[in-house]
Image (cartoon, rainbow, N blue to C red):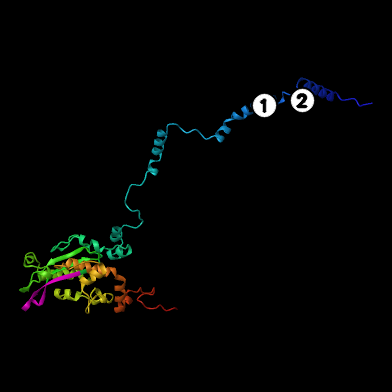
Amino acid sequence: MAPELSSNWKILQARLKAGSASEPAFSSSASASPSAPANNKKRKSASDDQDSKPKNKRTRTSSFPKKQPTNTTSATSSTEKMGAVSSQPVTSTAPLTNQPSIHFLRQNHGISHESLSEAYNLTISPTLLSSLPSHPNQGLSPTASLDRTKYLAIDCEMVGFGPGGVDSSLARVSITDFHGTQIYDSYVLQREKVTDWRTAVSGIAPKHMRDARPFSEVQAEVAELLKGRIVVGHDVKHDLKCLDLDHPMKMIRDTAKFSGFKKYGNGPKPALKALAKEILGLEIQTGQHSSIEDARVAMLLFRKHKPAFDMEHANRYPEDVKTKQRPNKAGKGKKSKRK
């Protein structure tokens, strides 16, 4: 005899029979009923419709990008307005550099003009030499800055006196600084009768004596300028002789005696005109000489080969190198004794 079913099981069986009687199962209708494909199609389309609709706002935001505003003009203008400071292009043509101001260093740190020029490779182009202003017979330039100038270039023009005009007398003296800037220029009154003005070469004529300065005045001013400074020039001893001045040989850089220029001379020393053409590519002294131009050319030649000049000077005057050496910490250059 079969066991009697529990009351709960009977209720469950009744509900299952009632559900199968009102709606057939999906698996049986798919296999037995010819309308099953239509039902499947209907169910699929309903499912698609439900999938096509966004379930919530979060899904819509993450699946689709936010619609851009149609008014692009206003959007662009607002963006430019908000970032105007940081997004504007740089319109200044000034070079960007982190180098300190040369004027600042010169005024506040005691650095010489020449040291600054060497440090920042500031050179004078030979092609721009003619563009530098010249002021004949100006005397001491009112804008000359000589507080920390170490090098000065000098050149003189002479006229002849005595029988045949073979003896030379100072008629003009010009001085420039390391950068070719005119520092001093003056015509000089003659103390003796001139027998040969040498105008074709010197450029000096009687008219220049009208505003010329006395020799003693020029001599004193030039001596003050050259004191304690390195003098650059071509065959400097002749310039100093006509000025009746002495200057320490170790404080002279002579382009006529520099060993590196010997190959450009046909004789014992090369001419300044030959050096200017061969080394700088400049044509000078094609007519009347200019003492300002010659001083500038001498300085250019020196600056172009300054390391070699310095090396030759160190070999010729080794005592200068020794005096520049820093003394030891014990002081007075003596070796300290260990206790």
Of residues 166 and 41, the one drawn nearer to the viewer in this rendering: 41
* Disc 2: which residue: 32
Visible in this render: residue 162?
Answer: no
Query: Alpha carbon of mark 2 to alpha carbon of mark 1: how far?
Result: 17 Å
The residue stretch that appears in magenta: 154-169
Of residues 9 and 294, the one drawn nearer to the viewer in this rendering: 294
Residue 325 image-quadrant placement:
bottom left
Secondary structure beneath disc 1? helix
Rendered location of residue 49, percent (x, y):
62, 27
Horizontal side of 133 relative to 90 (left or right) equals: left
Number of numbered callouts drawn: 2
* Disc 1: which residue: 41
Residue 146 image-quadrant placement:
bottom left
Secondary structure beneath disc 2? helix
Of residues 312 and 128, the one drawn nearer to the viewer in this rendering: 128
Of residues 197 and 310, the one drawn nearer to the viewer in this rendering: 197
> Mark 1 or mark 2, which is nearer the start of the sequence?
2
- Using a 10 Å C-alpha cutoff, classify the residue at mark 1 as few (fewer than 14 neighbours), some (14 to 19) or many (20 or more): few
Give yes or no for residue 158 being in the magenta stretch. Answer: yes
Residue 256 drawn above or below residue 123: below
What label sits on residue 127 in the rendered view? Answer: none
Q: Residue furthest front?
A: 34
Rendered location of residue 323, percent (x, y):
32, 76
Rendered location of residue 117, percent (x, y):
29, 63
Is most of the magenta stretch helix, strand or loop? strand
Residue type beneath disc 1: Lys
Residue 235 drawn above or below residue 18: below
- Using a 10 Å C-alpha cutoff, classify the residue at mark 2 as few (fewer than 14 neighbours), some (14 to 19) or many (20 or more): few
Residue type beneath disc 2: Ala
What is the quadrant of the N terminus in the image? top right
Horizontal side of 75 relative to 38 (left or right) equals: left
Rendered location of residue 131, percent (x, y):
21, 60
